[in-house]
Image (tube, coloured by chain):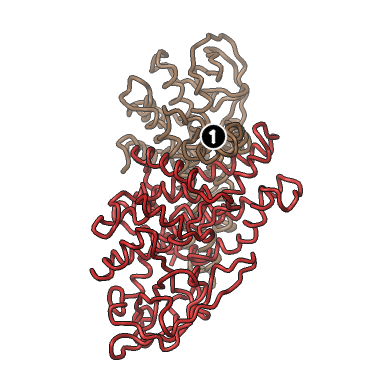
Chain colours: A brown, B red
C-alpha cells in the first residue's frame, strides 16, 4: 500500500523526469537546475514533507526519497527535505537550503543557503562547480556570511538514511529495467530471459534488491526508537553492498547497449555507485556497528542482533 | 512493468518479548552442558530436550489446541525457533515434524491421522523424516520411482529414499511415491504415504557424511505393506501437497543461522575493542543478519495471513544460504591459524565441513534461483 505522498510524487516525477532532463542536469560543470520541476514540487508541497508542522512524519520524508531514487530525480530533494525538517524556522519560499559535507554540497550553484552538518548556515557563499560520478552537481562551497543554527545530533544519520532510501528506489528501478530488457532482447532465436545463466544472475540480483529494500524500510520504521542509529548503520552498509552487486549484474544483462550514453540504465547505476560512497562507505558504517556489537560482548551478540542495540 | 516480490514491513508483536525472555531463560537452564560448536538444525538430536520443549508448549505452537497445539502465532513460533538455533540447542529430533510434517497433516491429513500424530509431535515424543529425494531423483523430484501399488488392505511399497535425516532414530517417514504410472503430466500420479520406519520391509542404512557425522540415511522399501489409512490427502495429489510444504521449509531462521556460533566465537576471540577490520567484519555480518531476520519475519507474517509465499521463501533461503556460507570464510580470513581445540577453530572447522550442505538441502541454490526467476516472470 503506497502512501498518498508517494503516489503524488510518483505522478509528478514520472511526468517531469525524462532522459533529456537528466542529460541536461548532468552536463559537466554546467548542469542545469530543473526549474519547472522544482516549481511543481513546491506547488504540491512535497518539499515540506517531514517538516514538523506539515502533518507528515520523518518516515514519509524517506519514503518520498525512495520514489525520488526510482526516478533518478535531478535535484537535491534529500537536502531540501532534511534541511526543511531540521530548520523549521527558515521561512519557506526563499529558495532552498542544501547541505554540505566537508565543504561540498549538492546543487550549491542553485541554492540560497548551505547548511554544514555542525550547524553553520551559510547565507552568502561562492561556489566552485563539481560533480560526483553520476554527474550530479557536487559543488565546493566557500563561505561568506554565516549564522549558527541548532541542528539535531541525528543530522548525519538522516543524511546517511537519505542515500540509503535513494538507493533503495534506484535498486528497484534497476531490477525492473533488467527484467524487462531480458524479456525483450532476443539472441539465439529466443529472449535471453529464457537462458538459465541469465535467470540465475537476475535471481541473485532480485535477492540483493529484496534484502536492500527490507533493510532500508526497517531503518525507516526504526526512526525515533532507541536502536535507530544501529538500524541506519546496518541499512546503509547492507544497501551499499547490494548497490555494487546489482549495478554489476544489471550491466551484464544489458550488454553493450547498457554501456552507451544513449541508454537510460546508467542514470540509475551511476547514482547507485555514487550514493553508496556518500555519507559513509559500507566499511565505515560496518565498523561503527561492529564496535557497538563487540562492546556488548560475545554472549550478548544475539541480543544485539535481535534488539538492534 | 512492475516486479512484485513483496516483503511487507512486519514487526514482531510486543507479546513476543516476554516469550523470548522465557526461551532464553529455559535454554540457559536446560541446555546440555557440552556446548554445540554450531547452530545447525540437523545436528544435536536429544529426545530429552525435545520433550522438555514439548512440555513448555514450544512444539506445534501454531496448531489448534484440539490437536495438542498452542494456537499461537507464526511470530511466536519464529521467536522460539530462532532463539533455539542461535543458542545451538539440540533440536533435530522434533524439527522436521514441527516444521513441516505436522502442518502437512493439519492441512491434508484425515481426522484420525491428526488425532493420532499431532498431539505426540507437540509433546516432543514423535519424530518424522522427509521422504522426497531418491538415489536417481534429487532436484528433479517429480521423477521419483518409489512406487506404491494398491493391494488388499493397503499399499505395497517398493523403492528407496535417500538423504533421509535421522531415519535411524525417527519414528515415521512421509514418502512421496508414485501411485499411478507416469503419464503426460509428470506431476500427476504422485501420492504421500505416512510409513512407520520400524515396519516390516523397511531397511535403514546409514550414510556417513564428509564431516564424519551419521545423520542421514538411505531408506529401502521392499514389499513393505502399508495400511490404507497411511495415505495423506488424496491419491494423485502428492505434487501439490509436497510443494505446499516449501513455504515452511525454506523461509525459517535455520536457513541463515547455521554458522552463527562461528560469529559468536569470533566476537569472543577479538574482544571488546577489536582492530578496525575485525570491527568492520562484525558490523558487516550483523547488518546481513539483521536484514535476513527482517525478511524471514516478513514471511512469517505472510504465513500468519494464510498465504503461501513460495517465491519469498526461496529468496530468504537463497540469500540466507549464501550468507551462512560466506560467514566462516570471512572469519577465517580475519584470524590467524588457531589450535584445533580452540573454540573458534572448532566451530569454524565444524561449520566449514558442513557448509557444502547448506546450499543443497531443502532445495539447491540452482533450483531456488529457478523458482525466483519464475517469480520474476522470466520463465
Write down the chain letter for disc 1.
A
Q: Residue at 53% x, 31% y: name it.
A: A160
Point out residue A70 in the picture as x, y percentages from the top left corner. 44, 42
Expressed as whole percent of the image width and height from the top left, the position of residue A186 reads: 50, 67
Asked if one can make out residue A197 in the rendered structure from this viewpoint, the answer is yes
User: Residue at position x 28%, y 87% from top?
Assistant: B153
Q: Position of residue A239 (x, y in %)?
A: 53, 42
Confirm whether residue A28 shows in the render. no
- For label 1, the crowd category at 10 Å Cα-Cα, with few meaning under 14, some 14 to 19 and many 20 or more, is many
The image position of residue B73, as x and y in percent, is 31, 49
Is residue B91 rendered to the left or right of residue A257? left
As drawn, B9 above or below B53: above
Q: Is residue A99 above or below residue B7?
A: above
The residue closer to the viewer here, A276 or B104, is: B104
Describe the element under mark 1 as helix, strand or loop: helix
Q: In which quadrant is the N terminus of chain A drawn?
A: top left
For image coordinates 50% across by 30% down, the residue present is A229
Q: Nearer the viewer, residue B54 or A11?
A: B54
Residue closer to the observer: A92 or B16: B16
- Count of marks, rendered view: 1
Residue at label 1?
A: A233
> Which image quadrant is residue B154 in?
bottom left
Amino acid at each position: 500500500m503506497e502512501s498518498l505522498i508517494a503516489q503524488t510524487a510518483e505522478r509528478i516525477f514520472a511526468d517531469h523526469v525524462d532522459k533529456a532532463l537528466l542529460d541536461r542536469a548532468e552536463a559537466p560543470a554546467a548542469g542545469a537546475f530543473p526549474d519547472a520541476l522544482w516549481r511543481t514540487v513546491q506547488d504540491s508541497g512535497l518539499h515540506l514533507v517531514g517538516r514538523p508542522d506539515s502533518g507528515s512524519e520523518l518516515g514519509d520524508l524517506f519514503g518520498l526519497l525512495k520514489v525520488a531514487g526510482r526516478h533518478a530525480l535531478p535535484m537535491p530533494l534529500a537536502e531540501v527535505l532534511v534541511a526543511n525538517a531540521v530548520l523549521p524556522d527558515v521561512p519557506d519560499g526563499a529558495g532552498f537550503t542544501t547541505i554540505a559535507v566537508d565543504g561540498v554540497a549538492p546543487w550549491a550553484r542553485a541554492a540560497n543557503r548551505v547548511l554544514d552538518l555542525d550547524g553553520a548556515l551559510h547565507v552568502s557563499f561562492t561556489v566552485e562547480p563539481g560533480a560526483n560520478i553520476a554527474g550530479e552537481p557536487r559543488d565546493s562551497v566557500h563561505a561568506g556570511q554565516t549564522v549558527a543554527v541548532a541542528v539535531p545530533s541525528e543530522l548525519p544519520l538522516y543524511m546517511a538514511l537519505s542515500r540509503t532510501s535513494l538507493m533503495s528506489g534506484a535498486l528497484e528501478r534497476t531490477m525492473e529495467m533488467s527484467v524487462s530488457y531480458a524479456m525483450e532482447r532476443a539472441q539465439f532465436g529466443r529472449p535471453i530471459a529464457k537462458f538459465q545463466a541469465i535467470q540465475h544472475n537476475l535471481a541473485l540480483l532480485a535477492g540483493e534488491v529484496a534484502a536492500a529494500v527490507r533493510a532500508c524500510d526497517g531503518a525507516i520504521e526504526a526512526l525515533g526508537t532507541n536502536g535507530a542509529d544501529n538500524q541506519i548503520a546496518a541499512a546503509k552498509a547492507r544497501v551499499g553492498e547490494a548497490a555494487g552487486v546489482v549495478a554489476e549484474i544489471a550491466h551484464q544483462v544489458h550488454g553493450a547497449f547498457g554501456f552507451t550514453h544513449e541508454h537510460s540504465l546508467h542514470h540509475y547505476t551511476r547514482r547507485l555507485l555514487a550514493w553508496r560512497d556518500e555519507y559513509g562507505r559500507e566499511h565505515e558504517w560496518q565498523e561503527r556497528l561492529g564496535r557497538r556489537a563487540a562492546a556488548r560482548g560475545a554472549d550478548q551478540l544475539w541480543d544485539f542482533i535481535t534488539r538492534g542495540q | 512493468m512492475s516486479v512484485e516480490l513483496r516483503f511487507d514491513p512486519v514487526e514482531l508483536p510486543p507479546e513476543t518479548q516476554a516469550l523470548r525472555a522465557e526461551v532464553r531463560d529455559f535454554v540457559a537452564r536446560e541446555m546440555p552442558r557440552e556446548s554445540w560448536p554450531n547452530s545447525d538444525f540437523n545436528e544435536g538430536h536429544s529426545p530429552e530436550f525435545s520433550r522438555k520443549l514439548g512440555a513448555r508448549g514450544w512444539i506445534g505452537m501454531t496448531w489448534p489446541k484440539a490437536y495438542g497445539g498452542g494456537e499461537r502465532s507464526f511470530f511466536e513460533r519464529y521467536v522460539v525457533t530462532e532463539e533455539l538455533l542461535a543458542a545451538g540447542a539440540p533440536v533435530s529430533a522434533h524439527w522436521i515434524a514441527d516444521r513441516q510434517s505436522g502442518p502437512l497433516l493439519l492441512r491434508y491429513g484425515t481426522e484420525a491421522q491428526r488425532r493420532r500424530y499431532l498431539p505426540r509431535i507437540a509433546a516432543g515424543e514423535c519424530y518424522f523424516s522427509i521422504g522426497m529425494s531418491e538415489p536417481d531423483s534429487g532436484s528433479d523430484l517429480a521423477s521419483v520411482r518409489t512406487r506404491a501399488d494398491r493391494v488388499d488392505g493397503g499399499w505395497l511399497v517398493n523403492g528407496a529414499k535417500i538423504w533421509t535425516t535421522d531415519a535411524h532414530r525417527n519414528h515415521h517417514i512421509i514418502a512421496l511415491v508414485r501411485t499411478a504410472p507416469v503419464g503426460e503430466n509428470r506431476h500427476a500420479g504422485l501420492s504421500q504415504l505416512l510409513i512407520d520406519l520400524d515396519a516390516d520391509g523397511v531397511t535403514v542404512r546409514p550414510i556417513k557424511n564428509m564431516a564424519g557425522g551419521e545423520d542421514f540415511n538411505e531408506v529401502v522399501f521392499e514389499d513393505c505393506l502399508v495400511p490404507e489409512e497411511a495415505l495423506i490427502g488424496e491419491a494423485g495429489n502428492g505434487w501439490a501437497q509436497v510443494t505446499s510444504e516449501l513455504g515452511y521449509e525454506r523461509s525459517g531462521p535455520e536457513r541463515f543461522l547455521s554458522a552463527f556460533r562461528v560469529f559468536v566465537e569470533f566476537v569472543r576471540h577479538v574482544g571488546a575493542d577489536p582492530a578496525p577490520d575485525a570491527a568492520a567484519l562484525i558490523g558487516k555480518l550483523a547488518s546481513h543478519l539483521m536484514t535476513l531476520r527482517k525478511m524471514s519475519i516478513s514471511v512469517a507474517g505472510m504465513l500468519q495471513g494464510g498465504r503461501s509465499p513460495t517465491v519469498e521463501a526461496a529468496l530468504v533461503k537463497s540469500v540466507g544460504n549464501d550468507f551462512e556460507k560466506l560467514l566462516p570464510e570471512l572469519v577465517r580470513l580475519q584470524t590467524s591459524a588457531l589450535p584445533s581445540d580452540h573454540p573458534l577453530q572448532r566451530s569454524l572447522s565444524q561449520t566449514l565441513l558442513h557448509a557444502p550442505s547448506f546450499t543443497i538441502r531443502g532445495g539447491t541454490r540452482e533450483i531456488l534461483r529457478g523458482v525466483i526467476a519464475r517469480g520474476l516472470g522470466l520463465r
